[in-house]
Image (cartoon, helix red, strand yellow):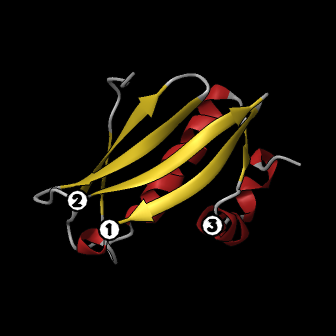
Amino acid sequence: MTTGRAVKHQEHDMTEVTITRHGSDQAGEYHAHVAGETAIGRLTWVMHGPVRAAEHTLVRPEIGGRGVAAKLVDALIADAREQGFKVDPVCSYVAAQFKRHPEWADLRAD
């Protein structure tokens, strides 16, 4: 299932990134589409009760260095706030982002 809601982000270099959501209530992915590129970034997740476990963040080298991974995590965090779930940062990149953003502490699963 793909949701119709996309979020667009722009970096300082004006790289446009669109985030789309794919999956079901139990598992899914966020996809980052960079304008003018065919490669996508992905953040995969699975639900464990009321907790969304962020398993992997994958960004192809062709679109690396543009903040794509951070935008994927930002979309996850925005959804957690909007939908009321907690996040288990299984992925080391997501865990590192939680350390960089203490304001997200209320969204981290215990």
Where is residue 2, by image quadrant? top left
Q: Residues within 10 Å of mark 3 (few under 14, many from 20)?
A: some
Q: Residues within 10 Å of mark 1 (few under 14, many from 20)?
A: few
Residue under circle 3?
Answer: 97
* Secondary element type, mark 3: helix
Where is residue 60, by image quadrant? bottom left
* Secondary element type, mark 2: loop
Q: Are marks 1 and 2 in contact (CB under 8 Å)?
A: yes
Q: Position of residue 95 (x, y in %)?
A: 69, 65
Kind of residue at badge 3:
Gln
Comparing marks 3 and 2, which lies closer to the viewer? 2
Residue under circle 1?
Answer: 60
Q: Position of residue 91 (x, y in %)?
A: 64, 61
Quarter of the picture containing the N terminus is top left
Q: Earlier in the sequence, mark 1 or mark 2?
A: 2
Q: Position of residue 84 (x, y in %)?
A: 70, 29
Comparing marks 3 and 1, which lies closer to the viewer? 1
Residue under circle 2?
Answer: 39
Relative to 106, 10 lies left or right: left
